Every structure is written in structure tokens, then in C-alpha cells.
Image (cartoon, helix red, strand yellow):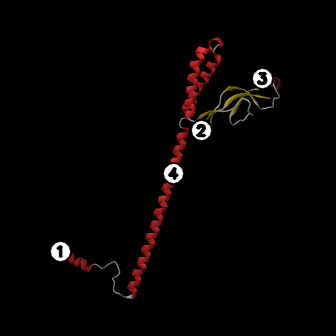
């Protein structure tokens, strides 16, 4: 059995060029070497591009997930805002003679609630005294200049927010709920 294998190995033609010392053989070897070096350089460049593409993808994905996480609480916060509105209304509706006892507790709960929302990136939209901005405000009523003068006590421009009916909120700079306001005509 070993004889057959030896004979088969002897019969096989070598795939590489023999080193015979001839100029033609050396030329062929040199050409194959250059071709192999070009392929190696091409493969290395391709690998480097693929690695760079992967690193860029990874960085973009981290940014995308970070952006998603930034606004992931948006639905939760929008469902909780009416509770904060109710605290504000409860605070306003306490009779003056009872404010000392009741107001302390409600105010503390409201303040804790506001602090919690601020820690989640929620901030109020500025309204009263500001010029109306349709990006942040929703008009629910207009006040005549004479009514506005009675409230403000001075010269009143048009499209100035005179009253805030419901607070508006932003989350991480993006509008969550517009402020419902009354403006001057």
C-alpha cells in the first residue's frame, strides 16, 4: 500500500514552478509573488474597510439607542401629567382659611412629582407674558384689549399670552404637550 502512494506522489505534477535557476522560472515566481502580494494588500484593505464600517455602524447604533432611550419615557410621562394638573388645581381650590394645614402636604407631593419629572427631562413651556408660538402653545380663547388692560394694567400688544389654562411640557427639548392659553387680540 505504501508503494502505491509513493508512485502516485511521483506521478503527480507539481503545481508550483520548480526552482531550476532559469530566468523564465524566476520571472514566473516573481510574477506569482507580486500577484500574491497584490491580493494580500487587497484583502487587507477590504478587511480594514469592513472593520471601519462595523465600528461606524456600532457607533451609530449606540447613538440611535441613546436617542430612543431619551424619549422612551414620553408615553409614561404624558399619562402622568394629568395627575400633576390635578395637584395644581387642588392647590388652587383650597380655601384661604385652610391653606396652612392642607397646602403643605399637597405642595410637598406636587413638588416631589415635579422634581421626578425634571429628573426625566421634562420641563414646562413658558407661557404667560410671552408672544404666542404655535409650536408650543394652543389657543383656546382670545381676550379683548380692554380685558387684557384690566388684567395687565399697561399697554398690551396683540398675540401676547395673557392666561395659561393648562400648562405645556417638553421632554428633552421636544414638545410633549402644548400649553393651552388665552391671548390678546
Determine which quarter of the picture holds residue 155: top right
Residue found 25% across the figure and 77% down from its top: 9
Upstream in sequence: badge 1 or badge 2: 1
- The residue that mark 4 highlights is 59
Upstream in sequence: badge 1 or badge 3: 1
Determine which quarter of the picture holds residue 115: top right
Q: Is residue 63 left or right of residue 140?
A: left
Q: Nearer the viewer, residue 56 or 123?
A: 123
Upstream in sequence: badge 4 or badge 3: 4
- The residue that mark 2 highlights is 172
Badge 4, how many Cα within 10 Å: few under 14, some, many 20+?
few
Name the spot of residue 63 as percent of width and height, x first: 53, 47
Task: For the residues labelled 1 and 3, say whether their Cβ atoms are less than 8 Å apart.
Answer: no
Q: CA distance from mark 1 to mark 4?
A: 59 Å
Disc number placed over residue 78 in the picture, else none = none
- The residue that mark 1 highlights is 2
Between circles 1 and 4, the one closer to the viewer is: 4
Q: CA distance from mark 3 to mark 2?
A: 33 Å
Between circles 1 and 2, the one closer to the viewer is: 2
- The residue that mark 3 highlights is 151
Name the spot of residue 94 as percent of width and height, x first: 63, 15
Q: Is residue 152 left or right of residue 164?
A: right
Q: Nearer the viewer, residue 29 or 48?
A: 48
Task: For the residues labelled 4 and 3, say whether their Cβ atoms are less than 8 Å apart.
Answer: no
Circle 4 — which element?
A: helix
Amino acid at each position: 500500500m505504501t508503494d502505491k502512494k509513493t508512485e502516485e506522489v511521483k506521478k503527480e505534477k507539481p503545481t508550483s514552478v520548480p526552482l531550476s535557476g532559469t530566468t523564465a522560472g524566476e520571472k514566473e515566481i516573481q510574477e506569482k509573488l507580486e500577484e500574491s502580494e497584490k491580493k494580500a494588500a487587497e484583502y487587507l484593505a477590504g478587511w480594514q474597510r469592513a472593520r471601519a464600517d462595523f465600528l461606524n455602524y456600532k457607533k451609530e447604533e449606540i447613538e440611535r439607542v441613546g436617542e430612543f432611550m431619551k424619549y422612551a419615557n414620553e408615553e409614561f410621562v404624558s399619562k402622568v401629567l394629568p395627575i400633576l394638573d390635578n395637584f395644581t388645581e387642588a392647590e388652587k381650590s383650597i380655601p384661604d382659611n385652610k391653606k396652612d394645614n392642607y397646602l403643605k402636604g399637597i405642595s410637598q407631593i406636587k413638588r416631589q412629582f415635579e422634581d421626578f419629572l425634571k429628573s426625566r427631562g421634562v420641563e414646562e413651556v413658558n407661557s404667560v407674558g410671552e408672544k404666542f408660538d404655535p409650536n408650543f402653545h394652543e389657543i383656546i380663547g382670545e381676550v379683548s384689549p380692554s380685558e387684557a388692560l384690566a388684567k395687565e394694567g399697561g399697554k398690551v400688544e396683540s398675540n401676547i399670552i395673557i392666561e395659561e389654562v393648562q400648562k405645556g411640557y417638553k421632554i428633552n427639548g421636544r414638545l410633549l404637550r402644548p400649553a393651552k392659553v388665552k391671548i390678546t387680540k
